[in-house]
Structures are given as structure tokens and as C-alpha cells.
Amino acid sequence: MDTATGSLTFTGVDLSDTHVVSVSAPAAAWSGGSTVPAASLAAFVSALTRTLADSTQTGSGSVGFSFSVADKAFDFLRPARP
């Protein structure tokens, strides 16, 4: 399992606005014209979770994230065998 976690902080001067965090499928281009397997792309999207602590009324907010995906999602990166 490959995992990563982190957070991003932000500030806003408009204390009445709200924020939204979303995840979408990544755009991927592989050198040499190959494509990233659809199963890997789907695994990457579902592997990312996020949590929003909005800045409404406080001016400070954050987005926490966690990425956890099985090693096999990266198998397409291994060198080709002769």
C-alpha cells in the first residue's frame, strides 16, 4: 500500500463566503504515446480523500488529504521485459 497525507491552509478576507473541495480524474499523458490504464486512474481517484475546515466566519481554513492506493495500481510504471 502506498500512502501520503497532508494539509493545505488558506486565509480569506471575506468572512461570509464558503469553499468547496472536490476530486476529479487526473489527466495523464504517457511518453511514447501509451496511456495510463483506466483501472489505475480509477484507483487513484478513489484513493484520495479530503476534509475541508472552512474559513467562514474565521478567515482561516484548511484542507486535509489522504492518499492510499494498492501497489498494483502503479504496476504500469515497471520497465518492460524483453
Image (cartoon, rainbow, N blue to C red):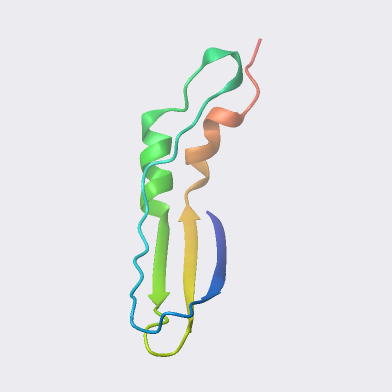
In the rendering, at what x and y percent does residue 1 appear? 52, 54
Query: On screen, 82 above or below 42?
Result: above
In the rendering, at what x and y percent does residue 5 appear? 55, 66
User: What residue sits 36% from the left and 51% below the top?
Assistant: 46
How many numbered marks are there? 0
User: What residue sits 57% from the left and 68% below the top?
Assistant: 6
In the rendering, at what x and y percent does residue 50 appear? 41, 66
Q: Residue furthest top?
A: 82
Which is more toward the observer, 17 or 6?
17
In the rendering, at what x and y percent does residue 18 appear? 33, 75
Which is more toward the observer, 71 or 31?
31
Query: On screen, 60 above or below 6?
Result: below
Residue 76 is left or right of residue 20, and the answer is right
Query: On screen, 38 above or below 25?
Result: above
Q: Quadrant of residue 80?
A: top right
User: What residue sits 65% from the left and 23% below the top?
Assistant: 79
Q: Residue furthest front?
A: 14
Q: Residue furthest bottom?
A: 58
